[in-house]
Image (cartoon, grey):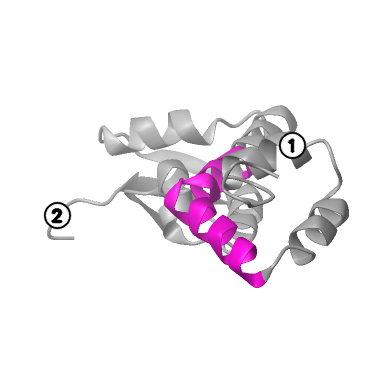
Amino acid sequence: MNSQGSTFYNFAEFWRLTRSLSTEQREIIFNNLSSKERKKLKYSYTQGGWEDLFFRDLLDKFHDKIIQEWKFDLLNTRCQVIKGKNICINKILWQHISNFLDQFHLKHTYYLIGGMKVEEFDKENLVLSSVKKGN
């Protein structure tokens, strides 16, 4: 118990002390806190940017997996597209990327796909191009 009479001072302390536990174990601890403490931790989680951090970590791992399995760097591609270069991408790969990213809010995925539009190129490929004002 900390000096304020709470089990955890904020979400940072909660995470520091529980990150080595499984998700289920963390949930048990969280669910056994008072409603006031749970509300305080949720507020600290939201206001402290933890949600953004956890989503960024998850999306970075996905990006690394795409590079490893497909030899395709989405961040580098986005940079090239935003600079005005059109890039062809395999439809199956783009569908894989889209299916995964569709489960997240755009605010979390923007750094990977923001500013790009996708159009049909041929039977097997799509073309990624820059979204410009007025388009």
Name the residue: 58% across, 51% down: 94
Q: Is residue 18 magenta?
A: no
129 in relation to 135, above or below: above
**In the image: residue 65, left or right of residue 124:** right
Q: Position of residue 75 (x, y in %)?
A: 47, 33
**Magenta-highlighted residues:** 35-58
Q: Is residue 32 visible?
A: yes
Looking at the image, which is closer to me, 13 or 103? 13
Disc number at residue 133?
A: 2
Q: Position of residue 105 (x, y in %)?
A: 48, 62
Q: Is residue 62 visible?
A: no
Quadrant where the C terminus is found in the figure: bottom left
Looking at the image, which is closer to me, 43 or 1? 1
Instruction: Read off the residue under disc 1.
Output: 17
Amino acid type at mark 2: Lys
Please identify the quarter of the rendering in which residue 37 is found: bottom right
Numbered disc total: 2
Q: Secondary structure at mark 1?
A: helix
- Look at the numbered discs 2 and 1 and tell me whether their residues touch, using CB distance below 8 Å: no
Q: Position of residue 112 (x, y in %)?
A: 46, 42
Q: Position of residue 38 (x, y in %)?
A: 63, 64
Circle nearer the N terminus (2, 1): 1
Name the residue: 61% across, 51% down: 97
Main SS of residues in magenta: helix
Looking at the image, which is closer to me, 36 or 103? 36
Quadrant where the N terminus is found in the figure: top right
- Disc nearest the viewer among 2 and 1: 1
Name the residue: 40% across, 37% down: 78
